[in-house]
Protein backbone atom coordinates (compact mmCIF):
# COMPACT_ATOMS: atom_id res chain seq x y z
CA UNK A 1 0.00 0.00 0.00
CA UNK A 2 1.05 3.58 -0.60
CA UNK A 3 0.17 6.61 1.47
CA UNK A 4 -2.75 8.36 -0.21
CA UNK A 5 -4.18 5.18 -1.76
CA UNK A 6 -7.98 4.95 -1.57
CA UNK A 7 -9.43 1.60 -0.54
CA UNK A 8 -12.83 0.04 0.04
CA UNK A 9 -12.67 -1.49 3.51
CA UNK A 10 -15.07 -4.17 4.72
CA UNK A 11 -15.22 -4.96 8.41
CA UNK A 12 -16.90 -8.21 9.45
CA UNK A 13 -18.26 -8.99 12.89
CA UNK A 14 -20.20 -12.22 12.97
CA UNK A 15 -23.28 -11.52 10.81
CA UNK A 16 -22.72 -7.74 10.61
CA UNK A 17 -20.70 -6.00 7.91
CA UNK A 18 -19.58 -2.38 7.65
CA UNK A 19 -18.21 -1.08 4.35
CA UNK A 20 -16.48 2.27 4.02
CA UNK A 21 -14.06 4.23 1.87
CA UNK A 22 -10.66 4.83 3.47
CA UNK A 23 -7.35 6.49 2.60
CA UNK A 24 -3.99 5.02 3.64
CA UNK A 25 -2.29 7.51 5.98
CA UNK A 26 0.67 5.51 7.30
CA UNK A 27 2.72 2.52 6.19
CA UNK A 28 5.36 0.75 8.28
CA UNK A 29 7.36 -1.68 6.15
CA UNK A 30 8.93 -4.78 7.74
CA UNK A 31 12.64 -4.34 8.50
CA UNK A 32 12.45 -0.55 8.09
CA UNK A 33 13.91 1.83 10.67
CA UNK A 34 10.37 2.66 11.80
CA UNK A 35 9.53 -1.02 12.31
CA UNK A 36 11.97 -1.04 15.22
CA UNK A 37 9.56 1.16 17.20
CA UNK A 38 6.19 0.43 15.56
CA UNK A 39 4.54 -2.74 14.28
CA UNK A 40 4.63 -3.43 10.55
CA UNK A 41 1.39 -2.63 8.77
CA UNK A 42 -0.66 0.31 7.64
CA UNK A 43 -3.17 2.78 9.04
CA UNK A 44 -6.21 4.24 7.32
CA UNK A 45 -8.56 7.18 7.79
CA UNK A 46 -12.25 6.71 7.08
CA UNK A 47 -13.28 9.29 4.48
CA UNK A 48 -16.76 8.10 3.49
CA UNK A 49 -19.21 6.30 5.75
CA UNK A 50 -22.98 6.55 5.49
CA UNK A 51 -25.05 7.04 8.64
CA UNK A 52 -26.35 3.44 8.93
CA UNK A 53 -22.78 2.14 8.59
CA UNK A 54 -21.54 4.71 11.13
CA UNK A 55 -24.14 3.48 13.62
CA UNK A 56 -23.23 -0.16 12.93
CA UNK A 57 -19.51 0.60 13.40
CA UNK A 58 -20.17 2.37 16.72
CA UNK A 59 -22.19 -0.63 17.91
CA UNK A 60 -19.44 -3.01 16.79
CA UNK A 61 -16.75 -1.01 18.63
CA UNK A 62 -18.85 -0.78 21.81
CA UNK A 63 -19.45 -4.55 21.77
CA UNK A 64 -15.73 -5.27 21.32
CA UNK A 65 -14.74 -2.85 24.10
CA UNK A 66 -17.22 -4.43 26.49
CA UNK A 67 -15.92 -7.94 25.77
CA UNK A 68 -19.41 -9.05 24.82
CA UNK A 69 -19.50 -12.32 22.91
CA UNK A 70 -22.29 -13.45 20.60
Image (cartoon, rainbow, N blue to C red):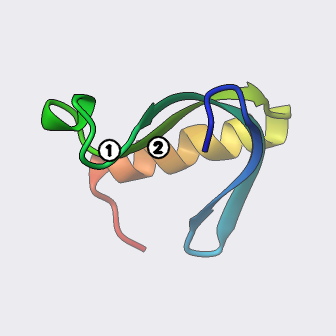
Label 1 residue SS: helix
Could you tell whether 12 is left or right of 68 in the image?
right
Could you tell whether 12 is left or right of 32 in the image?
right
Q: Which residue lies furthest to the front in this view?
A: 32
Q: Which class describes the residues within 10 Å of circle 2: few (<14), some (14-19), or many (20+)?
A: few
Residue 59 occupies which quadrant of the picture?
Answer: top right
Residue 34 occupies which quadrant of the picture?
Answer: top left
45 to 22, vertically: above or below: above
Quadrant where the N terminus sits is top right
Q: Which residue lies furthest to the left in this view?
A: 36
- Are discs 1 and 2 less than 8 Å apart at CB? yes
User: Residue sitting at 32 percent across and 44 percent down?
Assistant: 65
Could you tell whether 34 is left or right of 53 in the image?
left
* Residue 66 x/y as whole percent: 30, 48
User: Residue sitting at 64 percent across and 75 percent down?
Assistant: 15
Residue 50 occupies which quadrant of the picture?
Answer: top right
User: Which residue lies under the disc numbered 2?
Assistant: 61
User: Which residue lies under the disc numbered 1?
Assistant: 65
User: Residue sitting at 75 percent across and 44 percent down?
Assistant: 7
User: Residue sitting at 79 percent across and 33 percent down?
Assistant: 49
56 to 45, vertically: above or below: below
Q: Between residue 23 and residue 59, name the one nearer to us.
A: 23
Q: Which class describes the residues within 10 Å of circle 1: few (<14), some (14-19), or many (20+)?
A: few
* Residue 26 x/y as whole percent: 49, 28
Amino acid sequence: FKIGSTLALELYDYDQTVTCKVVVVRVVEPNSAESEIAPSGFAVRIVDLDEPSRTALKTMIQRIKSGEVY
